[in-house]
Amino acid sequence: QVRLVESGGGLVQAGGSLRLSCAASGFIFSINTMGWYRQAPGKQRELVAGISGGGSTNYADSVKGRFTISRDNAKKMVYLQMNSLKPEDTAVYYCNTRNRGYEYWGQGTQVTVSS
């Protein structure tokens, strides 16, 4: 079955960096679009960044120039490099994909940015 497992979250000071990882299994990873979403307390879940099987990327305006999404198809991994972190980046970050008409989520990893 499809499985997504995030790691790499933590507590960091404003201006710092973190790298999130998502390990994927159970589907043909190389052709699937992968995404990172986040949900802050009291707010809706929002798309942070996406990457297609061919490597095309898109970003939320709020993270452009600070975050970079990448993938390693051989390892079935997707990454989110987060630089110049701000307190408003504090949220639970989720890995996402769609496969055969269904949407799948990881368990999430907490990112907390202190001011």
Image (cartoon, grey):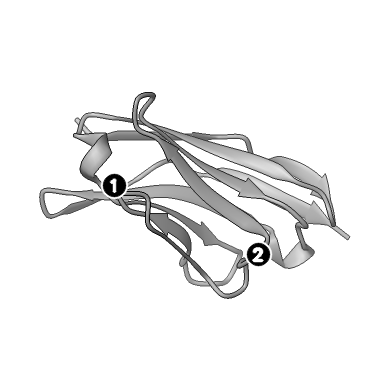
Q: Is residue 65 above or below residue 109?
A: below
Quarter the C terminus occupies:
bottom right
Looking at the picture, tell me which residue is in the foreground, 69 or 40. 69
Disc 2, SS: loop
- Where is residue 11 drawn, in percent x and y? 77, 43
Residue at horizontal 10 percent and vertical 48 percent from the top: 100
Query: In the picture, which quadrant includes the N terminus?
Result: top left
Residue 14 placement (x, y as % from top left): 85, 56
Q: Is residue 10 left or right of residue 46?
A: right
Give the residue at the far bottom of this rendering.
61
Residue at image position (48%, 44%) is: 70
Q: In terms of depth relative to the viewer, which is nearer, 43 or 15?
A: 15
Measure the C-alpha gap from mark 1 to mark 2. Answer: 22 Å
* Relative horizontal placement of residue 67, taking residue 11 as reference (left or right): left
Marks 1/2 in contact by CB < 8 Å: the verdict is no
Q: Which three-letter amino acid code belongs to the residue tagged 2?
A: Gly
Q: Which mark is residue 65?
A: 2
* Residue designated by label 1: 53
**Most extreme residue toward the left, as rendered?**
100
| Residue at 61% over, 65% down | 41
Which amino acid, mark 1?
Gly
On the rendered structure, is 61 left or right of 96?
A: right
Q: Residue at x 34, y 32 (%)?
A: 73
Residue 46 appears at what percent x and percent y? 47, 68
Of marks 1 and 2, which one's residue comes earlier in the chain? 1
Q: Residues within 10 Å of mark 1 (few under 14, many from 20)?
A: some
